[in-house]
Image: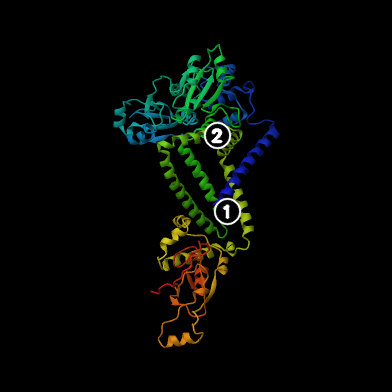
């Protein structure tokens, strides 16, 4: 496991270096960086509208380029990275309708009314009526709102007319669902579009106005001071200082996403003649996106990858104030990336690699889920609130550093280029496979083909079905000697598929001759004569047995007694067998003790030497 973790960290380091290399190549060819500011004056009217589309600002009624340019400048500084992302998103839009079709009341309630942390736009088609928006206009609407995380759907009343009558949807209309309260998992309110114009721009303006009404808006300087220094239950706040009528749609959409975690506040400074209040709280310019935490203030947009867009600010805020689900998804991705390393670390037949991979994936994910259950229970305890707050404090300190901004920027870059991420992971895995082959060049099993490995796998499987556990006498002591063995047995039960283990360790197992105790009178023939006269058989010479071996006189593999001067072999667990019997057992792929199932290639804590022979009964 530690090797997999090392290889995974090495892969992340490679991604980090590769991203810096790409930045250097772009700078060498174009002379610009992604964080370099762009002067909106140099952009065309079409490019300016593309930027406003991505930020979620309406530009209807602005016919001149100067007005559009001022709107871009008033909403935030424009960087080369944001311009590139906006152009790429515009080119990738295909116009496909990816909205949900609701089948009835329960389906609608489950997805719309029971979803407390999202926005829905639903087109209701009345029975025997045409939809309010045509198919083409609805597709444009879906494209426009989906980039802000707004989900869309269609409810046809012909599938559930009773629910439409209950709601009063007697004509085709548009319904928007927005969380009603500022608390997490609060109630949801449904808003019906009451406008006369059905153009996409007007409907989007209606939506953004309703969503923006949920954000606390400050237009007076004194109220800003009161709110800035007020100690509330929500210690993390995101301020937008701008000369706008309402905040951009991406800012309003994020306020819904982070309901209960971060408070979003819009400060309209259009009519402010005295800016001394802004200087007092540390705001040097407008527009500014300020994150206020108990540790201080942080100006968003000064570091790498901090663009004025939904995805960039969402990654930043998730790292600063994560929820438990974010941490679980991160751990799930890390664990599965580690598990997939087994595909390249394991050597041998192709089928063997995938069998080991499936086993590792099942084991790692099961252990991850089991590990998270007590963590979720501990987080519910009231006296751990201070520990949780201190953990978030340390996380905020770390996530506001330059290195953290690089990591977020790389995460955004590779998540938008999944083919590059997968290809680099494959190349990294092939390098691991190459070095593992070099390291295990002496392993005979690595060159086995699929048929040979399947044949040995079948022999291994049938051996566990045919040879049951012979004894449970030492079952309890097995777990006491090494608690880690219990976890291994839970992760790899006896009927699971195990990778083949090299047999080099067999030659290092202790081997000796079984002999009887010498006659006290010194007569070597006394043993034979005593046995022939019917006297009890003499005891074995236990002094010749290695330390830690259990005293016995019978091999449980062949069920025969040990003869004098026969070779016996002991396993790390302490059980002793005929040397020939146990070698055949181990060489067949059964790398465990026939009695207690302890791994035959794993050392065990030294047992105290027995003083009394075991009763053969």
| 1 or 2: tag closer to the N-terminus | 2
Q: In this view, does 337 lie above or below 350?
A: above
Q: Residue 284 carries which label?
A: none
Residue 153 occupies quadrant: top left
Q: Which residue position holds label 2?
A: 92
Report x, y in % for residue 318. Answer: 51, 34
Q: Quadrant of the C terminus?
A: bottom left
**Residue 507 relative to residue 142: left or right:** right
Q: Helix, strand, or loop for circle 1?
A: helix
Q: Which residue position holds label 1?
A: 344
Q: Which of 558 and 64 is in front in this view?
A: 558
**Residue 290 relative to residue 539: left or right:** right
Say if residue 336 shows up in the picture: yes
Report x, y in % for residue 534. Answer: 40, 86
Say if residue 220 shows up in the picture: no
Q: In the current view of this chain or complex, which residue is farthest to the top?
A: 273
Q: Is residue 616 above or below residue 605?
A: below
Q: Is residue 360 above or below residue 238?
A: below
Report x, y in % for residue 209. Answer: 45, 21
Distance of label 1 from label 2 (alpha carbons): 35 Å
């Amino acid at each position: 496991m530690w090797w997999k973790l090392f290889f995974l960290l090495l892969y992340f380091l490679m991604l980090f270096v590769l991203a810096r290399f790409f930045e250097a190549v772009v700078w060498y060819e174009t002379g610009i960086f992604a964080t370099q500011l762009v002067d909106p004056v140099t952009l065309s009217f079409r490019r300016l509208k593309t930027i406003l589309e991505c930020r979620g600002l309406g530009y209807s009624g602005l016919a001149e380029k100067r007005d559009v340019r001022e709107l871009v400048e008033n909403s935030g500084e424009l960087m080369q990275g944001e311009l590139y992302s906006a152009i790429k998103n515009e080119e990738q839009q295909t116009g496909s309708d990816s909205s949900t079709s609701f089948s009835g009341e329960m389906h609608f309630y489950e997805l719309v009314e029971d979803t407390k942390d999202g926005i829905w736009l639903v087109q209701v088609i009345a029975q025997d009526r045409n939809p309010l928006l045509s198919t083409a206009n609805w597709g444009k609407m879906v494209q426009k709102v989906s980039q802000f995380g707004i989900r869309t759907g269609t409810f046809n009343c012909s599938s559930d007319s009773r629910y439409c009558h209950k709601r009063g949807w007697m004509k085709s209309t548009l319904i928007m669902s927005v969380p009603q309260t500022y608390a997490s998992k609060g109630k949801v309110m449904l808003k019906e579009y009451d406008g006369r114009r059905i153009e996409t721009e007007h409907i989007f303006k209606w939506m953004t106005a309703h969503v923006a009404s949920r954000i606390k808006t400050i237009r007076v300087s004194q109220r800003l001071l009161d709110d800035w220094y007020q100690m509330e239950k929500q210690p993390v706040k995101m301020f937008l200082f701008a000369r706008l009528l309402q905040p951009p749609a991406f800012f309003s959409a994020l306020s819904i996403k982070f309901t209960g975690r971060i408070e979003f506040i819009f400060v309209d400074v259009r009519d402010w003649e005295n800016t001394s209040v802004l200087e007092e709280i540390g705001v040097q310019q407008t527009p500014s996106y300020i994150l206020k935490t108990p540790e201080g203030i942080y100006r968003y947009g000064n570091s790498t990858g901090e663009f004025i867009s939904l995805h960039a600010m969402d990654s930043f805020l998730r790292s600063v104030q994560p929820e438990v689900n974010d941490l679980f998804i991160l751990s799930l991705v890390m664990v599965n990336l580690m598990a997939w390393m087994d595909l390249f670390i394991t050597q041998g037949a192709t089928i063997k690699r995938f069998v080991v991979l499936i086993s590792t994936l099942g084991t790692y994910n099961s252990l991850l889920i089991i590990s998270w259950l007590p963590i979720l229970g501990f987080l519910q305890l009231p006296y751990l609130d201070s520990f949780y707050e201190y953990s978030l404090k340390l996380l905020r300190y770390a996530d506001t550093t330059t290195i953290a901004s690089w990591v977020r920027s790389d995460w955004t870059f590779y998540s938008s280029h999944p083919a590059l991420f997968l290809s680099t992971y494959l190349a990294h895995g092939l390098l691991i496979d190459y070095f593992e082959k070099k390291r295990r060049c002496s392993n005979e099993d690595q060159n086995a083909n699929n048929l040979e490995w399947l044949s040995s796998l079948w022999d291994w499987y049938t051996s566990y079905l045919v040879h049951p556990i012979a004894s449970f006498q030492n079952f309890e002591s097995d777990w006491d000697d090494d608690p880690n063995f219990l976890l291994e047995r839970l992760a790899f039960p006896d009927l699971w598929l195990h990778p083949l283990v090299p047999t080099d360790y067999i030659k290092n197992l202790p081997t000796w001759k079984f002999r009887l105790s010498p006659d006290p009178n010194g007569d070597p023939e006394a043993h034979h004569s005593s046995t022939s006269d019917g006297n009890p058989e003499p005891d074995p010479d236990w002094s010749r047995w290695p330390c830690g071996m259990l005293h016995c006189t019978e091999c449980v593999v062949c069920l025969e007694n040990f003869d004098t001067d026969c070779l016996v072999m002991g396993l790390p667990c302490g059980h002793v067998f005929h040397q020939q019997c146990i070698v055949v057992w181990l060489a067949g792929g059964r790398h465990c003790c026939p009695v207690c199932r302890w791994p035959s290639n794993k050392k065990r804590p030294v047992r105290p030497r027995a003083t009394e022979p075991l009763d053969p009964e």
